[in-house]
Image (cartoon, rainbow, N blue to C red):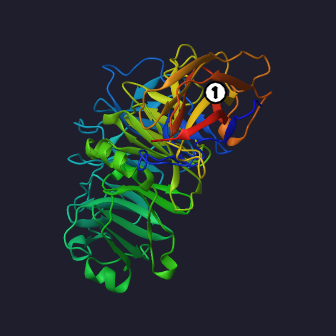
Amino acid sequence: MPKGLVPASISAPGFFGLNTQNKADILPFQWATKAENAVLDDSGRIACRKGYQQVNATAISGSPDVKSIFEYIDASGSTLTILAAGNAIYKDNGDSTLTDISGTITTPTADNWKFQNFNGKCVGFQTGHSPIVLATVGGTFADITVASGTASSNEVLSAFGRLWILDGSDLKYSALLDETHWTTGAGSFDLSTVWINGMDEPVALSEFNGHLVVFGKRSIAVWNNPWVPTGTGATDVANNMTLVENIGGVGCIARDSVQHVGTDIIFLSAQGVRSLGRTIQEKSMPVNDISKNNNDELNLSVSNETVSDIKSAYSKVEGFYLINLPSTDRVYCFDLRGTLQDGTFKTTTWETSFKSMFVDGSDNVYFGDAGYLNKYQGFLDGVDSDGSGGSTYNLVYESGWNDLGEGLSSLVKLPKRIVTLILGGEGQTVVIKWAFDYEDTFSTFLKTLDISDSSGWNVSEYNIGEYSGGLVYNRIRAPMSKSGQVIKFGMNVEINGAAVAIQQIDMYSKIGRMAV
């Protein structure tokens, strides 16, 4: 190394994920201030997300948005992927075609169905519509003929042998294993007597460790012993179901943001993405803010959304929780394989827009958009159902501002070269960039990655450690220009059929006078 050059080595840059909350401050290089179209792989590297391939060969007539996706599982264990779009319900035939299975239901005026598996059937609920039912995987939907009571709701939960719905200020439950009876063998609770901060608006339901959770917009109520809710109202609370936890000041604002993630529940609150700690046994349920490193930008995006359009998904295999904000063309991706010291999850974003998302029992991740059901796979976007076509997308990484630490923080840096080590990639274009002193005007260096016959990355799933074939490391050396007291690095990589991860960045610079 030439005399007088000071090295700065960054292994696994962006290892902590995205931090937009402090993007104007000095940050360690472990943070990223941009991580677009990215995930954190199993080694903690910033890596590109996968692309998606269309399941159906021909778009649904009129190309309506696919707003709901669900996997129906019947009593025998047979499965069927269903989707709602264009005021109709379709099934995936498994051969690149979709079939309308709306059957005899009253014609819908919206597609925001909440589907649940119940007693070998599939039921669906949404605001202003009669509830519907599919009895067999080979059948079609029909309106549920309610024999007693009423069953109108935008939310439904199948749990504890019953259906549970939210109807105005009431929590209702059906008769045991019977979706048609809502008074006989059924009952209700008046939630207005429950909310800890007075009146609230119920939004979502969930099962949690044998308990029933009701999410309001500003509070959360938890009951135990929901297996035997006999009688109605106060009788239930006194003799069977008991309110064991009542949390005020935080709730859920989007029905479809609620996801079970192993032993926890994640949901979107007015303050950001939260997790509900699994500590009911000690009669204490802390609610953790897992998005606080990005809450300002996240909440600004949420404020521009129609909450019924906000969707989410959880994949155990991929290790992420996704929350989709379609109006801003952004998906927030939370890595769930380990928390940071402050209890938050590592976060990246995807700059793409979907209208729905779902993960089936085999952990296949699906997205819905205009006229198509899509599967998360490969490394191109919008690939045709036969595997042809598709478009590229860009992995974008930027560090925070950094002054190279104690002893050098007040001095001017005169960088001479930067060396980046990239894992994967085949003939793809990489732009290395850097900027100084809080001005996001980048100097750039462009390089096309080599093509190697030994790479198996175009078929392997790098983020769960299933490598096949040799790995290609591309080392890019770039001369640097300009100077300054604080510096930011960045990288744009065109994803064109092969996966990419950022392994290391090394900068060599001379040190000048003290900055004025």
The x and y percentages for residue 76 are: 57, 48
Which residue position holds label 1?
A: 416
Query: Left or right: where does residue 440 sit relative to residue 336?
Result: left
> Which quadrant of the figure has residue 288?
bottom left
Which amino acid type corresponds to the residue marked 1 in the rendered image? Lys
Depicted 332 relative to depicted 490: above or below: below
The x and y percentages for residue 228 are: 41, 76
Q: Classify the position of the N terminus by image quarter.
A: top right
Depicted 434 relative to depicted 182: above or below: above
Task: Say if residue 143 shows up in the picture.
Answer: no
The x and y percentages for residue 68 are: 38, 39
Question: Toward the viewer: 9 or 237?
Answer: 9
Question: Toward the viewer: 19 or 7?
Answer: 7
Q: Classify the position of the C terminus by image quarter.
A: top left
The x and y percentages for residue 125 are: 31, 49
Question: Toward the viewer: 441 or 364?
Answer: 441
Is label 1 in a helix, a strand or a loop? strand
Task: Say if residue 211 shows up in the picture.
Answer: yes
Depicted 258 relative to depicted 143: above or below: below
Question: Toward the viewer: 443 or 44?
Answer: 443
Depicted 417 relative to depicted 113: above or below: above
Query: Left or right: where does residue 148 sit relative to residue 430?
Result: left
The total of numbered circles placed on residues is 1
Residue occupying the point 24% across, 47% down? 130
> Which quadrant of the figure has residue 59?
top left
Residue occupying the point 37% across, 22% down? 60
Q: Badge 1, how many Cα within 10 Å: few under 14, some, many 20+?
A: some
Residue occupying the point 23% across, 39% down? 106
> Which quadrant of the figure has residue 467?
top right
